[in-house]
Structures are given as C-alpha cells and as structure tokens.
Image: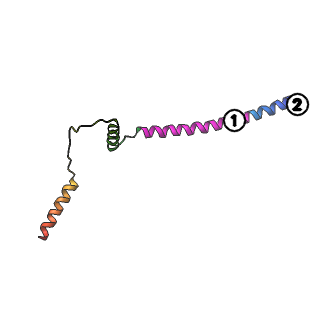
C-alpha cells in the first residue's frame, strides 16, 4: 500500500508540473501569436512615396548611377492661388 501511495503522490506532482509547463507554453504561444499579428500588420502598411524616393536616391548615389529626369509635373494647389489672389486684392484696396 505504501508504494501505491508513493506512486500516487509522485504522479500528482508530475501532473502538477506538467500542468504548469502547459500553462507556461500556452502563454508563450499567445504572446508569439500577438507579435506575429503585429508584424503582419506593419508589413501590410504602405511605405510613403517620399520615403521610397529617398531610399532610391541613396541607393542610386551609392552605386554610382546617375539618374535622368524624364518628366516633371508641376501641380498647383488651390491654397497657393487663393493666397496670391488675396495678396493682390489686399494691395489693390490700399492703393
């Protein structure tokens, strides 16, 4: 009977240790899954165009490639034109 009690106590200790290890592993897996989800979200974000241009220019300069400009487009913003009109109209008032 003593051996049965001893083996029963050993089994319960072993079961408790295994249970603790499973809980610890579950927490680690959850933590890693959260990190992977955050990394996936970051990789899905688009890189801004100005950053890509800066990286391209740096790589091109490092490799000694002289780029050529093929096209330039000037865009007029409404705010610039409005400010210009306001300045002209304001001057006309005081003259």
- Relative to 42, is 85 on the left or the right? left
Q: Which residues are magenta?
A: 15-43
Residue 84 drawn above or below residue 67? below
- Residue 19, numbered circle: 1
- Residue 2, numbered circle: 2
Location of residue 25 (image quadrant): top right
Query: Label 2 crowding class (10 Å Cα cut-off): few <14, some 14-19, many 20+?
Result: few
| Spot occupied by residue 89 in the image (x, y as percentages of width and height) | 14, 64
Location of residue 27 (image quadrant): top right
The structure residue drawn at horizontal position 77% and vertical position 34%, both measured from the top left corner, is: 12
Query: Label 1 crowding class (10 Å Cα cut-off): few <14, some 14-19, many 20+?
Result: few
Disc 2 to disc 1, C-alpha distance? 25 Å
Quarter of the image with the C terminus is: bottom left
Quarter of the image with the N terminus is: top right
Viewer-proximal residue, 8 or 56?
56
| Spot occupied by residue 51 in the image (x, y as percentages of width and height) | 35, 43
The structure residue drawn at horizontal position 22% and vertical position 39%, both measured from the top left corner, is: 69
| Spot occupied by residue 45 in the image (x, y as percentages of width and height) | 39, 40
For the residue labelled by badge 1, is the local secondary structure a helix, a strand or a loop? helix
């Amino acid at each position: 009977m003593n051996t049965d009690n001893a083996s029963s106590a050993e089994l319960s200790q072993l079961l408790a240790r295994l249970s603790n290890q499973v809980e610890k592993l579950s927490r680690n897996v959850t933590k890693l899954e959260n990190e992977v989800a955050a990394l996936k979200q970051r990789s899905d974000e688009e890189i801004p165009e100005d950053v890509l241009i800066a990286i391209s220019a740096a790589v091109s300069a490092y490799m000694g490639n002289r780029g050529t400009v093929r096209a330039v487009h000037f865009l007029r913003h409404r705010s610039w034109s409005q400010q210009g009109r306001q300045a002209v109209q304001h001057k006309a008032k005081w003259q």
